[in-house]
């Protein structure tokens, strides 16, 4: 099952989610279909790993 | 010469030549940024803009110009699918090739209103099988679908097909940067997702007309397609050949691939923030549909004037649809505040791919 991790950017704010174990980085853009899938994953009650963990 | 008769139909046809006649992008299957002609079996994008979906894994192989047959006259590429087994579809199975057209490119068709326009789908198809085949037009929610049928009469022979459809006057059809119209070609669908041919249906996720030929049902069966055009109006016109650069730029609104040209291909420039990270930007050739997702394969490096440091991770960092910015992390060695650029680290296998697909 896919697991996500939050990621911080240059200015210390959360700017992306990455898919753990894959070299994929997803911007927090509601029109991005990968981000939409992440939101659906969240809606199922899942929790991403925090940034910096 | 005196002009005595004006054919209204011709006027309509000619008018379409002045605009974006073919709503399908890469209908001639010439651009294959992701795979560069390599084959695949996964449910993912094949040639640019064209996806494959299979509800069961490994039932077939897709590839640009699979089988290396001669394309129909006027074309140099096609998208091919080859069945890898004699699979009997389950009632809920679906196998198809598809393209999702952005709503901004279909808004003038007025689907979902009383003034919905006719559209005509035309394409060249070739299969080792004969019989009744099918495909579909659908909306973003897949709850308004037109499963269409067509006949392939002769095996292993290119045939051009035309399907005219009275636009849907009901349902929700997006006119935004979301999915406007989905177009698909069936390769095998079970009863649950099949419906009466050539009529609009509200049944969910329909991808084939009832009784359509199942390509995945015959081991080694082939299905090749090219010259796909979806245009406004009830008459098919000649294929809309666009300049190669134009077609590539249209594809790049949804997907861009960097890497593979030289072993030290440079793709981004910026600054070292710390001894382990550099923030670098890439000016994209066209504005993408949305802020893109990044996927990358090794090996990339950060060059800061004296050495190249191997990139261990890349994270998007305040990108936009026009300027892609990311944080490139290395193990150590960078000098803060130095100018940095990102380059393939002695590798033609490195890829950095941006996706804003629908």
Image (tube, grey):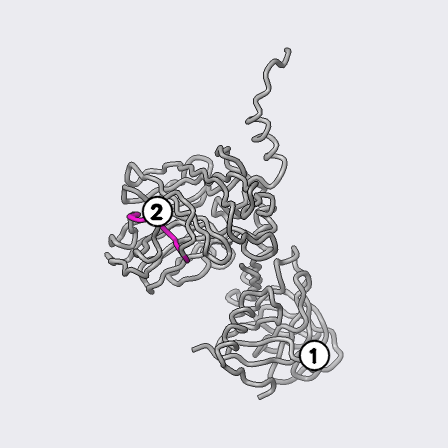
The secondary structure type at the circle numbered 2 is loop
Separation of residues labelled 1 and 2 (CA atoms): 55 Å
Local crowd at mark 2 within 10 Å, few (<14), some, or many (≥20)?
some
Give the camera-side residue of B204 and B184.
B204
User: What chain does mark 2 sit on?
Assistant: B
* The quadrant where residue B253 appears: bottom right
Of helix, strand and loop, which mostly describes the magenta segment?
Answer: loop
Local crowd at mark 1 within 10 Å, few (<14), some, or many (≥20)?
some
What range of the chain is rendered magenta? Answer: B204-212
Where does the image place residue B141, in percent across and percent down from the top left? 49, 58
* The quadrant where residue B133 appears: top left
Give the camera-side residue of B324 and B69.
B324
Residue B206 magenta: yes
Residue at image mark 1? A10
For the N terminus of chain B, the quadrant is top right
Lateral position of residue B40 relative to residue B26, left or right: left
* The quadrant where residue B277 appears: bottom right
Lateral position of residue B161 relative to residue B258, left or right: left
Residue at image mark 2? B196
Where does the image place residue B191, in percent across and percent down from the top left? 30, 55
Give the camera-side residue of B100 and B322.
B100
Q: Residue furthest bottom?
A: A53
Residue A19, relative to residue B204: is it above or below? Answer: below
The secondary structure type at the circle numbered 1 is loop
Lateral position of residue B257 relative to residue B94, left or right: right
Q: Residue at x 51, y 76 (%)?
A: A43
User: What chain does mark 1 sit on?
Assistant: A
Give the camera-side residue of B120 and B343.
B120
Q: Residue furthest top?
A: B1
Residue B179, relative to residue B27: is it above or below? Answer: below
Where does the image place residue A41, in percent across and percent down from the top left? 50, 75
* Front tag of 1 and 2: 2
């Amino acid at each position: 099952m896919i697991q996500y991790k939050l990621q911080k950017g240059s200015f210390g704010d959360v700017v992306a989610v990455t898919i753990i174990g894959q070299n994929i980085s997803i911007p927090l853009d509601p029109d991005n279909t990968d981000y939409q899938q992440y939101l659906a994953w969240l809606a199922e009650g899942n929790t991403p790993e925090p940034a910096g963990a | 010469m005196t002009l005595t008769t004006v054919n209204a139909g011709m006027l309509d046809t000619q008018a379409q030549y002045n605009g974006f006649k073919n709503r399908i992008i890469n209908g001639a299957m010439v651009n294959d940024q992701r795979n560069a002609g390599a084959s695949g079996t996964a449910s993912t994008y094949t040639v640019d803009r064209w996806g494959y979906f299979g509800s069961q894994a490994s039932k077939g192989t897709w590839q640009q110009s699979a089988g290396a047959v001669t394309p129909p006259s006027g074309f140099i590429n096609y998208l091919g699918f080859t069945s890898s087994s004699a699979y009997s579809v389950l009632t809920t199975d679906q196998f198809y090739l598809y393209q999702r057209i952005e709503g901004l490119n279909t808004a003038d068709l007025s689907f979902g209103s009383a003034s919905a326009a006719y559209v005509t789908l035309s394409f060249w198809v070739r299969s080792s099988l004969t019989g009744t085949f099918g495909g579909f037009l659908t909306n973003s929610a897949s709850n308004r679908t037109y499963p269409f049928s067509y006949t392939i009469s002769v095996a292993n022979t290119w045939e051009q097909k035309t399907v005219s459809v009275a636009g849907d006057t009901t349902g929700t059809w997006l006119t935004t940067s979301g999915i406007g119209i989905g177009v698909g070609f069936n390769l095998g669908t079970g009863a649950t997702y099949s419906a009466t041919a050539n009529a609009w249906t509200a049944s969910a996720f329909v991808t084939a007309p009832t009784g359509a030929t199942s390509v995945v049902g015959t081991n080694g069966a082939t299905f090749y397609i090219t010259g796909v055009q979806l245009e406004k109006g009830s008459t098919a016109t000649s294929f809309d050949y666009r300049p190669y650069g134009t077609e590539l730029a249209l594809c790049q609104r949804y997907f861009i691939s960097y890497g593979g040209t030289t072993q030290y291909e440079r793709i981004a420039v910026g600054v070292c923030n710390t001894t382990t990270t550099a923030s670098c930007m890439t000016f994209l050739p066209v504005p993408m549909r949305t802020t893109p997702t990044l996927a990358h394969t090794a090996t990339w490096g950060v060059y800061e004037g004296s050495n190249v440091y191997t990139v261990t991770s890349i994270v998007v960092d305040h990108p936009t649809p026009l300027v892609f910015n990311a944080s490139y992390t290395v193990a150590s060695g960078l000098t803060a505040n130095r100018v940095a650029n990102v380059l393939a680290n002695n590798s033609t296998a490195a890829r950095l791919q941006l996706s804003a697909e629908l």
